[in-house]
Amino acid sequence: MNGVSLELLQNWLAARSIARGLPMPVTDRGGLRVDTGSPEELRRHVFAGPEAGISELAREIDDPRVFIKMCGPREHLLSRVTQRWHLQPGAYLMMKAPGINPVPSLPPGYWMQLKTEEQVTSARIYTESDMQVASGYAVEHEGVFIFDRIAVDVMHRQQGLGAALMAALGTAQQSRAAQRLLVATEMGRALYVTLGWRVLSPYSTVALTPANE
């Protein structure tokens, strides 16, 4: 077991939809579906584990803009799909227990804008010349507090900007009991571990190869 319940997954996906202005997730084939509707991604199906519904979807889907995602090892997801499907870059669902939020601190030469509109808090970091070099978002919803799209320009990394973003966004959390969640890339995982986060589960993705490839 990977420790991810369908309820936790639904709450995280719902908060993510709020952060990105997307439709709320709906139950589908034992998992959840988000109709993202972008040119690159028509929809995504997300599962808390290797449910039988994954195999059913894998046989039916023909559009390479539809993604299947699962909490669990890549091999477990691959075992549920046909050979038409291919692994995408791996990620990790991470959590941090509620606790004291660190005080936001920026190195010299940068300034931050922190803004909350309805449920979404955004943080942006700028240089002294007002060039944006880092950004991130946070949403609290149904017992979870999620961090989303944490990004630091490659030329401004290793200076503590990512930690400053996380600390600033964390100040928006209203309930101290809300569980903090995020999805990290392989590179991002290393940063979050230093900030006290732990991996709850691998977050695996497969997609079809487009017909012209």
Image (cartoon, grey):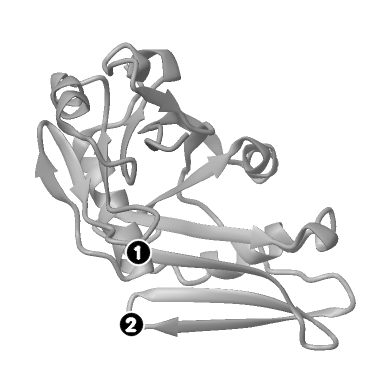
Instruction: State the residue at coordinates (32%, 11%).
Output: 79
Question: Label 1 vs label 2: CA separation?
Answer: 11 Å
Between 39 and 181, which is closer to the camera in this rendering? 39
Q: Amino acid at mark 2?
A: Glu
Residue 17 showing in the rendered view: yes
x and y percent of residue 157 in the render? 81, 56
Q: How many marks?
A: 2
Mark sitting earlier along the chain (1/2): 2
Instruction: State the residue at coordinates (20%, 36%).
Output: 6
x and y percent of residue 176 in the render? 40, 59
Q: Amino acid at mark 1?
A: Glu
Could you tell whether 58 is left or right of 211 in the image?
left
Please, what secondary structure does the residue beneath circle 1 have? strand
- Residue 154 location, quadrant: bottom right
Residue 101 showing in the rendered view: no
- Bin the neighbour count of mark 2 within 10 Å (Cα to Cα): few under 14, some 14-19, many 20 and up: few
Between 38 and 209, which is closer to the camera in this rendering? 209
The residue most toward the right is 108
Q: What is the quadrant of the N terminus in the image?
A: top left
In the image, which disc is placed on residue 32?
A: none
Between 35 and 104, which is closer to the camera in this rendering? 35
x and y percent of residue 75 in the render? 41, 13
Q: Which residue is mark 2?
A: 118
Q: Which residue is mark 1?
A: 140
Could you tell whether 151 is left or right of 23 in the image?
right
